[in-house]
Image: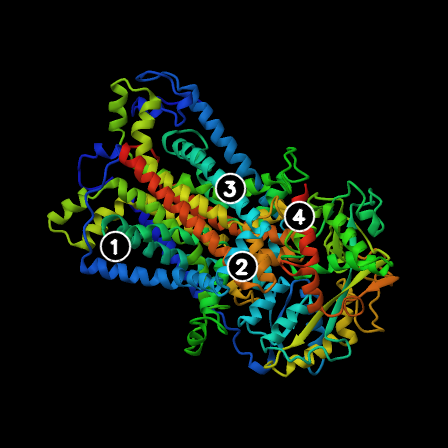
Amino acid sequence: MAEPVDAAGPADAAPADGRRARRGSRRRRPRPAVGRYVQRLIVVAYLFFLVAWPVSLVAKNAFADGLVDMRSILDDPDVIHALRLTVYVAIVAVVINTVFGVGISILLVRYEFPGRRALSALIDLPLSVSPIVVGLSLVLVYGGRNGWFGPALEDAGFQVIYATPGIIMATVFVALPLVVREVVPVLEEVGIEQEQAAWSLGANAVQTFRRITLPSIRWALVYGVVLSLARSLGEFGAVKVVSGNVLGETRTATLVVEEKYLNFDRGGAYATAFLLTMVAVACIVVVSFIRPDEGQP
Amino acid sequence: MKNRLRTAVALGAASLLAVSACGSNDDGAGASDDETISIVGFAVPEAANKAIAEEWATTDEGEGVEFKTSYGASGDQSRAVESGLDADYVHFSVASDVTRLVDAGLVADTWDDGPTKGIVSSSVVVFAVREGNPEGIETWDDLIRPGIEIVTPNPASSGAARWNALAAWGQVIKGGGSEADAQAYLTSFFNNVVALPGSGRDATTAFLGGTGDVLMAYENEAILAHQNGEEFDYIIPDTTMLIENPAAVLEDATPKAQEWLDFVLSEDGQRQFALTGFRPVIDGVEYGEVEGANDPANPYPDVPNLLTVETDFGTWDELSDKFFDEETGIVTQIIAASGKGE
Amino acid sequence: MTAVAVPRGRSARRRRPARPGGLSRVSGLGLGVAMLWFSLLVLIPLLAVVVTAADGGWETFRAALTNEQTAAAIRLTVGMALLVTAINVVMGTLIAWVLVRDRFVGKRVLEVLIDIPFALPTIVAGLVLLSLYGNDSPVGVNVANTRGAVFLAFLFVTLPFVVRTVQPVLAELDRDAEEAAASLGASRFTTFRRIVLPALTPAIAAGAALSFARAVSEYGALVLLSGNLPFKTEVTSVRILSSIENDNLTSAAAVATILLAISLAVIVTLDVVQRRIARRG
């Protein structure tokens, strides 16, 4: 496959790794640098061995006995309920994280207030907490018997732990920094001039947000949402602790995977994992589809 | 491009509505409290419990009763109940998971006063080896031969994994050795250990995935694995440990739960356990052939020297302190030393 | 891409954004709401962990730190996470570069691959990694029960981070400055080093912080492959789990708190470092 000549200029052919850079500038290269092929090879090989191959194994094992495992999964009403619960929780968690994520990003980048740097550092913390500790911390505070707030909340009729709200909280917790970390660098990069221009032209906060800020962070937001969605679908450890795993009520898809695994139903475990992955892949593909080709000015 | 984005967002919103509309009805509609029993148990008896429930539904007491079930790792489940997970009947893999609830005031301390001392299912520690037993592992002494690679679940992170370490220690004492001998044996044993996965199931997976020559397993897991097509052999050593799984009804449980427990302990209930790999805890249970056992016609051969907690170790609390205390436990220290040694 | 045509040539060079303003009433309210949500969800639960650890007084902390097995586990976890983060910084930037600047058949497939490690339940990740890179490995690469297993599991779960933080910034980057540099005779390497890299540094640092944080907390994917051998392949999460299993909540909380402190330190360091680099470019 012949590499199309880049009209955008020589900078395009610059490989990321300087070791393979050709010295001196050249315009309109008739052939792409060897470096480019090497780059591609490295990236493809890396992704193949680390991701593609392991994940294809999931598919292979899910269909090792043909459609039997798939069918038994889809016929089981408890599993269907678990899948629905997972998707519901994931979507709610993503929406919450997106709304607060964008809000916090704007606050962190566009405003100055005491404790701004501290908040920025703290935002990343949830991701570094082991899932066991996530569950533990939520139970310590919201647990119905001995928690700080739990008993009061349950007396008021609102059960958090071992019910859906707890699952949502755990899921929001583990995916929290993702949207923020995507959006903040882009906001910093894009700069404030356009927003200031808009303000000086009389736009109010909402208009500025909708017409200037949001379009500029659009793709960062999309990546953040996709990452959050993937994380929310796949979260297992923290959810295990706070959900109570009650069949037909608080059991999520990842817990189904664990249960099948524990009962030596490997085919079922892989089939469920495959379904989960497919949902995530579907979202990612949709995103990839609506995104224009990169590299256009 | 902007239209595509709008379409995608619209699709997303639509699917969100569709999902939430049929998604989150948590409540089991209709069943009144009296007729619903919440079972919280460790993972392996799930199949047995389901079968027992089906049988119970054909009797007078069991007719019309619904179940809410939760299964998982024994320790996790016990801690969940302690933190507020709704439960009427619990079934765990070690006694300490029940005493945790007794200490929390959720279970009466008379739970183990019955004829079976609170135990509803049991099994024994076995050696799982590769098909055909290429290394010729038959006895405990074979395990500490140089070059033999052992896989055993980690006693520190899994309560249920402690049966294996207890068996290894107890068989030395039973054979006439002293505590010093037992300590020496355990040291050699853990020097041969190549993996300490977090739970029994993880250990089985690691073993089936190619790690090690021998796996310290439970007979019921080995039988269940066979029933699901896994291929390996298992050996019941002459001296081994009786694994006892306790069950209890909670203090504020619905009265039906006690009837359930009684049924579980009856012949019909115990038969279902036997068919899924557990050894019945009462005598005279008829179960025919048990698929997956070494000899389906005689699936649960008598063990010449059977170690039990009561006769060989005192109480579970005592042995917990002596062997598994985080700082001073004998086994804990041996494991730590084995890691530092090499 | 944006409505207002403002010269964006400067965006290729790292520059400070116009001085952020103070809080207006609306944004003040927004901050309050955000802080409330963040506190209820994250800060207070984490505080509960720290308080539980403090229950045992200074003794518990010291005991947890000086317990040799725990110390070894912490060293392994943090060390491996730093190594993996370093690799992610290089590979992640490279992958992002190829995805944004390169064009070839099948590139879209790569896009999809990157986020999958994230969506896979960690048990399944562990199972497939075990079958591919364990004892029965079809390619003869066997890392089961070695530190390589920890390395591999960390690498797997942190793949998306640097890639996904760098990609959007790279896509927004204006080429003018790069072209100008090239036309002035700068080599590609110099162009990359002095123009592109400084602009990407905040994004790389953000991704690196995420990558470190995620690696340090990983448990499920490596539990089957690593064998949990004390002093060799046992990670901190296993130590925490052991303490919990022994009903020793104070110890567990102490170890968790130490890990939190280390993570916070790394995150802050990354933040300081990236500011320094940005200032110089």
Q: Secondary structure at mark 3?
A: helix
Residue A197 at x, y percent in the picture: 14, 44
Distance from label 1 to label 4 (Cα)? Answer: 60 Å
Residue at 75 percent of width and 76 percent of height:
B117
**Looking at the image, can residue B211 be seen?**
yes
Residue A65 got which mark?
A: 4
| Residues at marks 3 and 2 touching, judged by CB atoms closer than 8 Å | no
Q: Where, quadrant-wise, is the N terminus of chain A in this rendering?
A: top left
Badges 3 and 2, same chain: yes
| Dot 4 alpha-carbon crowd within 10 angstroms: few under 14, some 14 to 19, many 20 or more | few
**Are there few (<14), some (14-19), or many (20+) residues within 10 Å of tag 1?**
few
Q: Is residue C263 above or below residue C192?
A: below
Q: CA distance from mark 2 to mark 1?
A: 33 Å
Residue B82 horizontal/vertical position (percent): 56, 71
For discs 3 and 4, the disc positioned in front in the rendered view: 3
Q: CA distance from mark 3 to mark 2?
A: 21 Å
B64 lies left or right of B118: left
Residue at label 2?
C252
| Label 3 sits on residue | C79
Disc nearer the start of the sequence (3/2): 3
Q: What mark, if any, has residue A287 been given in the picture?
A: none
Q: Mark 1 is on which residue type?
A: Pro
**The furthest residue to the left:** A201
Please give the chain letter of the residue carrying mark 2.
Answer: C
| Residue named by callout 1 | A114
Q: Nearer the viewer, mark 1 or mark 4?
A: 1
Chain of the residue displaying label 1? A
